[in-house]
Amino acid sequence: MAHPVDVHVGRKLKQIRTLRRFSQTDVAQRLGLSFQQIQKYEIGSNRIAASRLFELAQIFDISPAYFFDGLYDDTNGGDKQADPGMEIVSALAAIQDETVKSRIVTFIEDISGLTVARQG
């Protein structure tokens, strides 16, 4: 059974990867891994070493602390509520048409005033 911290960190990896519009293959190639390894990280079945978290933070231009944001909310023993932000990220990731996905991201950027970093 996966440790709750590993599951949380994996969810945060999936969230930032999806927001930045990277595929699992894109991330895997930058790390010299297989996309299957990224899948295992994202579901929490494989732990992510500190050095790997640091590399991921560099890839996504974020602080390594990002992966632990909200951790206490996930592990405090209370009723686990679905994270609406993560549900939106998952729904966006499920959209196959890249043109539609791009239009949705542009819309979100327009109304939020924030810019989502794009893969480059």
Image (cartoon, rainbow, N blue to C red):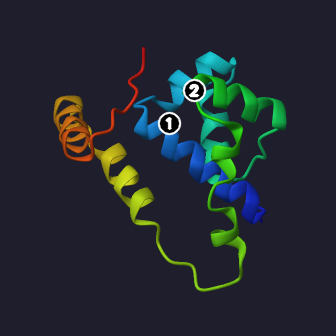
* Amino acid at dot 2: Asp
The answer to whether 112 is drawn above or below residue 6 in the figure is: above
Q: Position of residue 20 (x, y in %)?
A: 43, 32
Quarter placement of the C terminus: top left
For the residues labelled 2 and 1, the Cα–Cα distance comes to: 11 Å
- Residue at far right of view: 50
Of 54 and 11, nearer the camera is 54
Q: Position of residue 49 (x, y in %)?
A: 82, 38
Residue at 68%, 62% in the rendered image: 71
Residue occupied by mark 2: 61
Q: Position of residue 5 (x, y in %)?
A: 75, 59
Residue at 70%, 68% in the rendered image: 72
Residue at 40%, 31% in the rendered image: 21
Residue occupied by mark 1: 17
107 displayed left or right of 34: left
The mark nearer the N terminus, 2 or 1, is: 1
Residue at 39%, 50% in the rendered image: 89
